[in-house]
Image: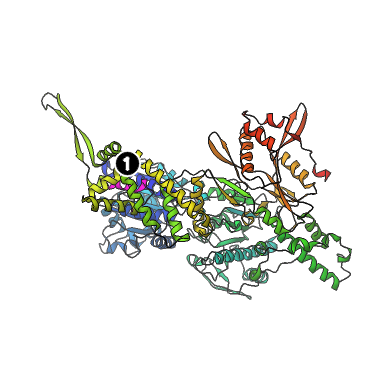
Amino acid sequence: MRYELFDFQKDAVGALLKKMRAMRNSYDADGSLSSVSLTAPTGAGKTVISAAIAESLFYGNDTFEGDDHAVILWLSDSPSLNEQTMKRFDAATDLLNGATSMETVGPEFAKAHDRLMPEHIYFLNRQLLSKKGKLTNNTEGGRTFWDVLTNTIEDTDTHLYLFVDEAHRGLGKDATSDSANKTIYAKLIDGQKGLNPPMPCVVGISATPERFNAAMNGRKNRDMKAPVDVPISAVRASGLIKDMIELRTPKKKADTRHQDLTQACVKLARASKLWKEYCTKNGIQIIVPLMVVQVEDKVTKETLTELCSQILKVCKWLGDDCFANVFGEHDDIETAVAKIPYCSPEDVSGNTGIRVLFAKDAISTGWDCPRAEVIYSRRKRNDPTYIAQLIGRMIRTPLARRIESEEELNNVACYLPEYDSETVEDVVEKLKEDNVAVAEDGGILKNPADVSWYGNTRRKAEKKLKAKKAQNSENPSDDNNFEGASPVNEKISEYVEDTNEEMSNDDLGEFDVDTDDNETIEEIEDVLERTPKVDQKLIKESFESIITRQVRHDKPNAFMDLWDCVDIISSDIDSDSDLNEKITKDFCNNVDAEIERNPSEYKRAYNEISSTVVTVKRIDPLTGEEYEDREESVENDSDRMIAYYRKAVSTFAGASDIVKEYINQYRVNKSVNYDKAVARMSAVAACFEIVRGLEQWAEKKTHELLDTYGPSRYAVAEENKAKWDRIEGNTLPFIESTLNIKAIVKHQNMDYDRYPKHIFSDDNGWTYLKLNDLEKKVVYTELSRKLNVAWYRNQSRNLNASLAIPYKLGGEWENMYPDFIFFQRTNDGKIVRTIVDPHGDWLGDSVAKLKGYVAYLKDHPNMFGSVLAVADEKVGNVTKYLYLDLMNTEVQDTIDNFSGSSAKELFLGDLSRPYTIKSDSDS
C-alpha cells in the first residue's frame, strides 16, 4: 500500500480477510455458500480499506499468506463510481495496477474472455446485465457473461469473490425460483437454473448494510457470517472526518435566504484565509475551499443570475469564472453576470479554479470533495435526504487528519434557510440513518453561534463605531447621532490598539467581504460593554502560559514508539544522524543477549516453532486393539514457517526491515541456511520472556532519545506531532504542554444561556453556555467582583485548549477539567489567573480529584493566584455554599493525608470557608 493505514483500517482488513478465507474453505469442503458485510461509516476510507483487502488477498501481508487463485468481481450500479474506484485503487496500492490487474467489464467482455483470471479485479455495473444487454445475450453462438461466470465458478483452481459496492441498494429481500422476477443482484448471487451457478462468496460493503444483511439472511442456503464493523469512534478519532457539522437555520420559519447566502460567503472567505495561512506556514500545497450551492430541481436562469450576483458582490475577490455546475443535464449555463459551465463530479475536487459549485441533489454516489467547506441549500423541507447525502459527501478532511492548531478548519457549515429549529431534525435523523461518523453528543450542531477572540469582537465594533461617527457627521439629523452616545467608548483604543496580529482572523485581508451593517450606535456600545475591557495581549499571554497535563490512555507498544521516535528524529530533527543503523545494530545485539539470558525458554520456543509433535497410535486391524501409542516430532514446512515469520514481524510492530536484518546477519555470521535463521527469529518473537526483555530495552532507548531530542520537539512536522505526543505520553502518565487560544472551539449553541465578559464571544459580545445551577451562581458571583476582568469556560477534552489536571482513581490515571478560569487585573496592571471550580463533593471521585489538584499545584505553585473548590451542602434545610482554598498549604497537607472516601468531611470541616453567592439579579 502507498498509504499507511490507520489501526482501525488495518483491523478491518485483517478481520475481513479471515472471514473470506473461512468462507472459501467452507465452499471447498462441502459447497457451502456464504456472505459477509463490511460496515464502514461515511468517512472511514472504505475505498482504501477495500484496496488493501484486494492487495492482501492476492499477494499477502504480514498476517495473511495471500491466495494466488483469488479473483474479485466488483459490482456497483454506476459506471462512474466503478471508474472512480479503479482510479483510487490504482493510487492507493503498490501492487494493483490499473493496466494489468484491473479491468472494466464492457458490453463486449464475454467475446474476449472465457473466464475471470486470478489476481484480477473486474469492475461491473449492473445495468450491463439487463435482459436486453449485449453482455447477457449471445450473438451467433458466442458466450454470454453468465457463461464466463459459470466457467470461473466451476474451475477449482479459481476462487471467485463477489464484492457488492454500496450494498444497500438493488437487493431483493430473498431468493426466488422465478428468474423473471429476480433482481440483477439476485441473478448473480443466487444463480439461474441452466445459466449460472450461485456465487460462492459474497462481500457487501456499505455505510448502511442493513438491507444487504436482511437480503442475505433471507436466503435459505447461504450462511451469513458475523459482520465486520468499523467503529465510528475510531473513525472520529483518526481525524479522517471533520469534527462537527453545523446546521444553520432560522429559529422560526422566516425568509432568510438572502442573509444566509451572505453568511455562507463570509464562511467561505474565512475558510479560504485560514487554509492559506495554515498551508503556507507548514509548507504544504494550499487547500482551496469550495462552497456548494444546492438549488431546486427546476431552478430558473434568473435565480442562478441572482445567486451569482450576490456571491460576487459579497466576495469581490472571486472572479466570474469561479462557478461550475454538476446538474444532470450536463449543460453549460450562461447568465447575465457569469458563466456556469458543467463539470463532471469526479473532476471538481482537483479543479481548484472552481470555488462555487451548483448542484441539485447529492451530486453522485461515491463522490466526495474534502475541500468543500460550506453548503448553502435552497432545498425544501421535504428534501432532507438530498441534503443529508450531500453533507455526507463533504465531511472528509482535506489532509486526512484534523488540524489541531485551528479548530475552525475541522468543521463543515450548512446553511438551510428553508428549515427551522423543528424541521431541521429531519436532516439530523437522515444523517444518523446514513451512519455519518460524527459524535452523538456535539457532532451535529443546530442553531450555532460563531464566537471569536474578544479582541476581534472589540476591533470590529470599534470599526463600525467610527464608520457610524463619520456617517453621522455627514448626516447630523440621523437619529443615532454620535454626539449623544454614551462615553463608554472613550477608552476603546486602550483595549484594542496593542493588537496581536495572529489573533486577527476576522481581518480577512485579500478575502475581505462586503456585508450590510444596520446596527445602531447604542447596539454597538452594548457590545463593547459586554466584552472584556482589558488589553487582549495580556490575556492571550496569560492564557497561553497555562500548563496542562493530558493523560494518555492508549496502551503503549514499546517497539512502535521506538521505531516512530527514530523515524521522526531522522526526518524532522536530525536528518544527518545514522540513528536507524545504530538502533538496528543495538536491537540485533540485544536479541542475542536475551537468548543467552533465557536459554531454556528460548529452546522451548524454538522447538515449538521448528517442529510439530504428532501423536502416533498403532491399532491391530483384526482386533482393533491399540498396541502402541507414541509421539513423533515432524519438521514444519515452509508455509508454516512463513506464518511464524509474519507473526514475528507483527510482534515487533511491523518492523520487517529490522527483523530481516537480524535474520541475514545471523545467517552470514553463523553460516546457517535461511530457514534456520528464520526459525531463530520466530522463536524469539514467540518467547514471552525474551520479548519482555526487548520491550524493556525499547522503552529505555525511547527514554534516552526523548531526553536528547525532546527539547527540539518544536521542529517536529505538523503531520508527526500526534505521533510525537503519543510517544511522550507513553513514557509518562501525562504530557505537559501549554494552552493555545487558536485551538478553542469557536462554535456554540445559541439555545443555551448567554453570558458577558468571556474571552470568546459572538459579534454581539455574548458567549453561549449550558451551565447547571451551581455553575451559574459561581459565574454571576465572580463577574460581580471588580478584579475579574475576563473569564474562560474550560473546554473538556480539547487537547490544546483544555486545562487538564491528572488524578488517580482505582489505580488508573484520569483527566479532570476545572470549570472556570478567571483573569484578574491588579492595581499595578498585572494579570493574575484564578480557578473557581464548582466541585460536586457527592461524586465518588472527588477526593481523588482534590488530591490531583494538590499534586499539580505543588509542581506549579505560581500558575494560579487562587484555586477555589466550591460545593453546595445541605445542612438541615439550609443550603450552604462552601469552598476549600487549594493554594493554602494547610489545606493541601490535609487533603494529601486524607484517607476518607467522601469529600463532604473536608467541605464541612474547619478548613472550609463560606462562599457568598451573588445572583444575576444582584448585578
Magenta stretch: give its range.
Answer: 641-656
Give the main secondary structure of the magenta stretch: helix
Left or right: 851 in relation to 283? right
Query: Relative to 847, is 798 above or below?
Result: below
Query: Residue at 53% across / 35% down in the picture?
Result: 811
Q: Quadrant of the N terminus?
A: bottom left
Dividing the picture into quadrants, the one containing residue 899 is top right
Residue farthest along the bottom direction in this orientation: 336
Residue 237 point in image, percent of width and height:
52, 49
Q: Is residue 653 magenta?
A: yes
Residue 200 shows up from this direction: no
Q: What residue type is disc 1 on?
A: Ala
What residue did someone put label 1 on?
A: 686
Q: Is residue 769 magenta?
A: no
Camera-side residue: 918 or 202?
918
Residue 599 point in image, percent of width and height:
28, 38
Query: Residue at 58% across / 48% down in the picture?
Result: 429
Residue 186 shows up from this direction: yes
